[in-house]
Image: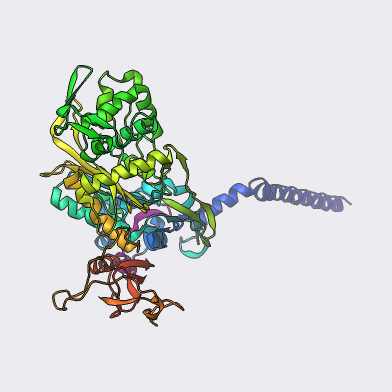
Amino acid sequence: MKKEQFLSRRVYLLISVMGLWGTVIGARLYFLQVVKSADLRDRAESQQQDTIRILPPRGVIYDRNRNELAASVQVKSVFASPVQIHEINATAVKLAALIGMPAAEIQGKLVEAKGKKFVWIKRKVSVAEADAITRAKITGIHFIEESQRSYPNGELAAHVLGYVGVDEQGLAGLEHQYNESIKGESGEVIYISDGRHKSYNQIESPAQPGASLVTTIDTTIQHFVEQEIREAEERTHAKEISVVVMVPKTGEILAMANYPTFNPNSYGSSDVVSRQNGSIAHIYEPGSTFKILTVGAAMEEGLTTPDERIDCLNGAIIVAGQRIRDHKSFGVLSVSEILEKSSDVGAITLGLRLKEVLMAKYIKLYGFGHTTGIDLPGEQRGLTKPVSQWNRSSIGYMSMGQEVGVTPLQIVSLVSMVANGGTLYRPYVVKEVQDPQHAVVSRTEPEGIRVMSLKSAQEMQGMLEKVVTDGTAKTAKLEGYRAAGKTGTAQKANPAGGYYANQLIASFTGYAPASNPEIAMVVVVDEPVGSHMGGEVAAPIFKNIADKILHYKGISPDIQDYAPPRYTSTPAKRPSAPAPTARPARIEELKVVAANFAEPGKSYEPGDITVPDFRGKSLRQIVEDCQSLGLGVKSGGSGRGKQQFPPAGAKVRFGTVVEIQLSAR
């Protein structure tokens, strides 16, 4: 009996011990699987997984004809998994020779990240570097695909486009202004590794591309402008040059360029001045181009008419005890002649009629002293002062364009207002924002306010046209087209007081055709060497650019009986022939349809200009060749010429637009 009781107690004891043991294990399992499950899962994942953020491809930036100005391309970036690397020094030395980095820098990165599974070595390596690393098969060195911004046209429209940093963040221009729209959404790559740190799987959350921008920029017109700026810099050795081309009836910017410039593909190799968009950030005293405002304001207030005769006092006037001299001695001039000959005394006389309050009113009304609202970062508002801070002589100096600071964009907006009949439009660069499927997210509509009566604007148009035909801007006369505008020559202000004697700014602002303005332009040349008058330096730049644009756009001449010059591809070897005659009444009899790159019904008019073979040529080469022959260009895609219409060898008329399909392959 005692033995049975003893055995029974042992059984109960064993059961109790096992029950306690089970309870402890159960409690432990509950603690691990329920209470600490999230923490343990995170620890396990941190040991087994590594998450790398994938930058999304930025949206494409197009010109108005859907030519690519900026796009994203896939490149490889190099990273290391230090936990997989046993010989840090040897790895650093071997890798350094392949990617052009100091071995000490690579070694420092690996040592600092020792025990970790990820550290960047070099972002966005070249194809050659990636191939060399792949062939070397270095343990612990891996690649990841990233997007890199590419500007296929190099410097073209650099100040408008801007540039991005290594993390694909917009740092200037449209890239910065529209960064939130075009940057896209980042993705992830998750590397899963075993206990020996060997990757055996990966899960991707793909990056989402950003929205695209369709701009108002015309690549061909932008090329015309930049080419002329380069040639002007070689002639004038100017410190800075800015040119803006605008559609006066809408505010669209067709081209905007500056010297000095930079290549956004390698922006780090340029200085701050080169990267600055002088068209919206360069503040200068405009000189005589500002007389457009003075005369226009006086006419709006009913204080003068184009035909009124004003005594210009033989070249000198006293304002608040200060003698202000004209650039020439003039006697009695009409108001129209005051603009035509750019008389300072005449402009000051009108300014004195306006007086301070009205002058200040029109300075603000016509867009000065505040930004235009263009959709680009870094725009300056210019320099103006409230009337309370004017000197007694300020009204005189402001009337002729001194004691006020403006930007080139503000001046072209002013002349555009006159050209379109009195409406001041907000300039803009982006026409549409489109999602990755090309659906329109937003569209920019022209936005303007009337600031001048149609009557005053029309009278100003007539006076500005005489400036070109008979006045200081004769060098702005166009081939076959009426033009209008105003020259400016201004001394640069000395921060210490007064003006520099030999530092000047030559400028011209105008539009064409004068009968129905299609383009308005401002040209500002800062500190030209040698010739320095606006009519000598800036007006010819306007002429050269405007002539090309109007022919490229196929705008009919508005000068009666104008016969365009005859262009041939080999003028020295071809016999002379009569100039092209007016278009015949039954033009359909002259049209030729070509099979190469031709849509149904596409045709061209035969003439005496031979179309070159543009296959394999860059867009810049194509534009230059067409320009020399008197042909226009319309391009699509990016890269080099692949297809064209009319085909190579076709005989076409002056002004024919050649359509080019570009391809990177």
The foreground one among 640 and 243 is 243
- Residue at the right extreme, as displayed: 1
Is residue 383 rendered to the left or right of residue 333? right
The foreground one among 35 and 638 is 638
Residue 125, by quadrant, is bottom left
Residue 287, by quadrant, is top left
Tell me which segment is drawn in magenta. Answer: 116-138
Task: Check residue 339 for magenta coloring.
Answer: no
Picture coordinates of residue 421 (x, y %)? 41, 44
Q: Is residue 617 above or below residue 236?
A: below
Is residue 524 rendered to the left or right of residue 662? left
Residue at x 23% of width, y 53% of height: 477
Res 550 seen here: yes
Residue 342, by quadrant, is top left
- Residue at the left extreme, as displayed: 530
The foreground one among 287 and 163 is 287
- Residue at the bottom extreme, as displayed: 595
Picture coordinates of residue 130 (x, y %)? 33, 66
- Residue at the top extreme, as displayed: 321
Res 402 seen here: no
Task: Check residue 137 for magenta coloring.
Answer: yes
Q: In this view, does 108 lie above or below 357?
A: below
Picture coordinates of residue 112 (x, y %)? 35, 48
Q: Quadrant location of the C terminus?
A: bottom left
Picture coordinates of residue 340 (x, y %)? 23, 40
